[in-house]
Image (cartoon, coloured by chain):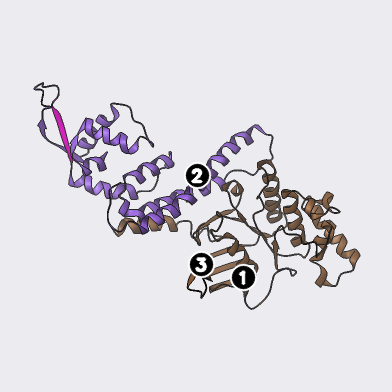
Chain colours: A purple, B brown
């Protein structure tokens, strides 16, 4: 959300449209969630409202609050993508961050990917190598195949990002 | 005790008519493996994983850096296929060498001045240890993937190595059988004290290992040192990136 407001100061509905355009393959929020998030960002001092413009039809209801990023918000956008991935659903967090990072920062992409790969490798090696046929082994196989697929994805994504890096000399927005 | 060590190893191959281009299957790689450990190297095709195995066996020489076994550089001394040395398990069985499994397994003992009876007994013991006793009189070409892996391990075991290198033991082996093969590798480390280092092309082969390393584009990542000293390297990298902003 913050990166979208940074890219283009705007009002809730428009930010929501861009949010869905960029992130809907990764995360699908409730209708109200985007507005709630803007409120939270405002309370945290990361965005601020500026001016109020009506929608052009003269109705009060349609007045829009525009938001722009604050200096604290700009600082936060440098800190957040570099923070350690959370234990709770790190894959989704990784994908969201990757969508929010500027393509010129592919080294940061790669660092995040390396961090996540460590997580995936640890998950796999910590699975027990036990005899088949137990109820426990059904669950184990599910996780094993899941983590293995994630590792395949990482081993595919890294060379892809490296190639992209070679083709991206200048900053380009995602 | 560290058995195998890679110290800043790079391997280059010249390509093209006049060596004008080069392929670098391994770059500046450092890692170590201790006795009694099971370490897996996961990587896709052409990632450099087979090059790592060949360097570890002493079959290939590093272009830069040092590969050592038990403190001796592999360039100076040969450890492959000798007692207390390195056993390299690959699933190729040439008919020129022998036509039955037991003879293939016994072939590793040819240089050890044993009687044919002693050699056959040790080959049978090794086949028993890996759970392939029933394959002894078979033609190696008739083995399925899982049996071929077991036999290849027996062929290396029979000489009495300290380090076992296993090239893709789960290739072609279905998911159920994979665990049987992996459990064998784990038991060789836990019960017999071998260092076991194997490659896999899929994360399904990483279950239960002591350490997992990955390779792509010739770069190693993951738990490169036995004491896990390098595990925190990634977090250091992240912090460094943060600090340099």
Pointer 1 or 3: first along the chain: 3
Q: Chain of mark 1?
A: B
Q: Position of residue B199 (x, y in %)?
A: 61, 56
- Say which mark, if any, is on residue B23: 3
Q: Secondary structure at mark 3?
A: strand
Q: Is residue B233 above or below residue B145?
A: below
Please tell me in which quadrant of the rendered image residue B242 appears.
Answer: bottom left
Q: Is residue A7 above or below residue B197?
A: above
Q: Position of residue A41 (x, y in %)?
A: 23, 37
Q: Residues within 10 Å of mark 2 (few under 14, many from 20)?
A: some
Identify the residue at the far front of this view.
B17
Dots 3 and 2: beta carbons under 8 Å? no
Q: Residue at x 67, y 53 (%)?
A: B169
Number of numbered discs overlaid on the protein picture:
3
Q: Quadrant of the N terminus of chain B?
A: bottom right
Q: Position of residue A73 (x, y in %)?
A: 22, 44
Res. B87 in view:
yes
Magenta stretch containing residue B30, yes or no?
no
Q: Are marks 1 and 3 on the same chain?
A: yes
Report the residue marked by disc 2.
Answer: A150
Magenta-colored span: A62-68
Q: Position of residue A31 (x, y in %)?
A: 30, 26
Q: Main secondary structure of the magenta part?
A: strand
Please tell me in which quadrant of the rendered image residue B119 appears.
Answer: bottom right
Report the residue marked by disc 1.
Answer: B60
Res. B1 in view:
no
């Amino acid at each position: 959300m913050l990166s979208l407001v940074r890219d283009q100061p705007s009002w809730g509905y428009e930010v929501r449209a861009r949010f869905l355009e960029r992130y809907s393959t990764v995360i699908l929020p409730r209708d109200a969630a985007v507005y709630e998030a803007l409120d939270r960002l405002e309370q945290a001092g990361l965005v601020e409202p500026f001016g109020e413009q009506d929608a052009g039809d003269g109705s009060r209801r349609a007045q829009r609050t525009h938001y722009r990023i604050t200096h604290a918000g700009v600082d936060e956008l440098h800190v957040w993508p570099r923070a350690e991935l959370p234990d709770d659903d790190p894959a989704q967090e990784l994908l969201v961050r990757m969508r929010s990072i500027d393509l010129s920062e592919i080294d940061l992409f790669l660092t995040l990917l390396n961090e996540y790969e460590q997580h995936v490798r640890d998950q796999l090696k910590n699975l027990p190598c036990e005899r088949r046929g137990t109820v426990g082994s059904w669950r184990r196989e599910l996780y094993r195949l899941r983590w293995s697929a994630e590792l395949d994805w990482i081993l595919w994504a890294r060379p892809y990002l490296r190639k992209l890096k070679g083709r991206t000399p200048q900053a380009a927005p995602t | 005790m560290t058995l195998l060590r890679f110290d800043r190893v790079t391997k280059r191959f010249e390509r093209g008519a006049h060596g004008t281009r080069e392929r670098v299957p391994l770059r500046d790689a450092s890692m170590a493996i201790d006795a009694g450990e099971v370490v897996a190297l996961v990587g896709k095709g052409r990632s450099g994983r087979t090059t790592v195995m060949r360097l570890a066996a002493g079959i290939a020489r590093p272009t830069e850096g040092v590969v050592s076994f038990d403190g001796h550089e592999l360039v100076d001394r040969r450890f492959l296929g000798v007692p207390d040395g390195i056993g390299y398990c690959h699933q190729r069985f040439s008919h020129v060498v022998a036509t039955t499994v037991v003879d293939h397994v016994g072939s590793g003992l040819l240089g050890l001045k044993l009687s044919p009876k002693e050699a056959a007994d040790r080959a049978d013991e090794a086949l028993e240890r890996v759970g392939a006793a029933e394959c002894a009189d078979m033609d190696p070409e008739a083995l399925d993937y899982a049996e071929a892996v077991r036999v290849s391990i027996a062929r290396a075991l029979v000489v009495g190595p300290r380090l076992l290198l296993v090239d893709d033991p789960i290739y072609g082996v279905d998911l159920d059988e994979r665990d049987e093969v992996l459990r064998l590798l784990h038991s060789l480390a836990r019960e017999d004290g071998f260092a076991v280092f194997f490659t896999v092309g899929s994360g399904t082969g990483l279950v239960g290992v002591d350490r997992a390393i990955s390779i792509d584009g010739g770069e190693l990542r993951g738990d490169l040192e036995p004491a896990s000293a390098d595990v925190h390297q990634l977090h250091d990298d992240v912090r460094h990136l943060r600090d340099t902003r």
